[in-house]
Image: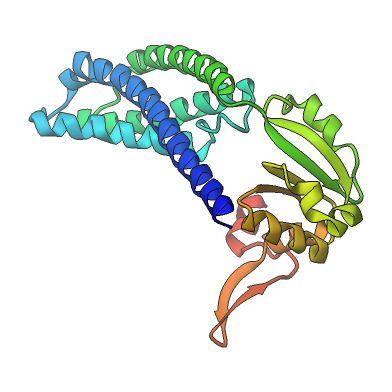
Amino acid sequence: MFCVNDKLKAKRKNHIMHTALMHIVDLVEVGAMTAVFGYVWFNYYLKLVYFPFFRIGNYMIIALYFGLFALFCHLYSGFKISISSISGLIYSQAVSILVTNAVMYVVFILLVRTIPTPVPLLVMCLVQFGVGVIWVLEVYRLYFVVNKPKKTVLVCDMRHDIEELMERYELDNRYKVIKSVEINEALNDIEECLGEAENVFLCGIHSHDRNVIIKYCVEKDVSVFVIPRVGDVLMSGAENMHLLHLPVMKLGRYSPIPEYIIVKR
């Protein structure tokens, strides 16, 4: 019992350290993008401001850019090295750069009180895109040097081609499939089937059987990836509400709001 608890504590400690390190790596990229923006701001757009800022005002503009870029990168999954492909990460970085710079251009218009030339901003986009590509390639390479593929068990019922899909979409460098078992086999001897797993993929499993596996994995601090059935997809779109002092999930047919219908027509 104490040995298991020690293993769980060590695993959680490693997870916290890993998360903190990844946040530092993310902040390095956000800082580099902000530095490029700061150069363009101080050397061009600041000179066009109708009422120039004092020092704190300039710092607030820099902080605004820092926060916006970090926010959009998070929203567009630009930091998800562990589950994204290189092309997906580069795309997310490009979208984050364009959206952030578009927002800042609107801010420039408000500060300058006219429409300034976007040329410096476009050049900045190209430079930032280059920085983003370099960051993605280097961090992606280093991430999989440090983090070896995790031992993974596939538990299947209806689908048996998940291992081929993982190889096709280059997930084999993240997940090392050590075993593929039927759900009945896993339920009969769950410790034997899942004892060595760091990750478990559940493919087409009915809810009752799936809950048994999930409870075991949560207890053992094993990550679970569930490929949903039709019912799961419907439940994911449910409206959460409180009724009779209880949490309730409301399901129904899709009913668009009137504004959407008007715009669509």
Residue 3 seen by the camera:
yes
Q: State which quarter of the image contains the N terminus.
A: bottom right
Residues 203 and 250: in front is 203
Residue closest to the eye, 119 or 203: 203
Task: Give the residue at x 61% y 52%.
Answer: 263
| Left or right: 149 in relation to 181 | left
Residue 102 visible, this orientation = no
Please determine whether, in this image, residue 151 is positioned above or below residue 47: below
- For the residue pair 200 and 29, the one nearer the viewer reads as 200
Q: Nearer the viewer, residue 51 or 154?
A: 154
| Residue 34 location, quadrant | top left
The percent position of residue 100, horizontal first and vertical second, equals: 40, 31
Given the current orientation, which residue lies at the most extreme left position? Answer: 54
Residue 31, given in percent of the width and then of the height, sits at 32, 24
Above or below residue 212? Residue 101 is above
Above or below: residue 41 compared with residue 19: above
Where's residue 184, x and y in %?
91, 56
From this viewpoint, which residue is outermost toward the front?
Answer: 2
Q: Looking at the picture, how far across and down is residue 157, in whole percent?
A: 90, 51
Q: Residue at x 54, y 35 (%)?
A: 77
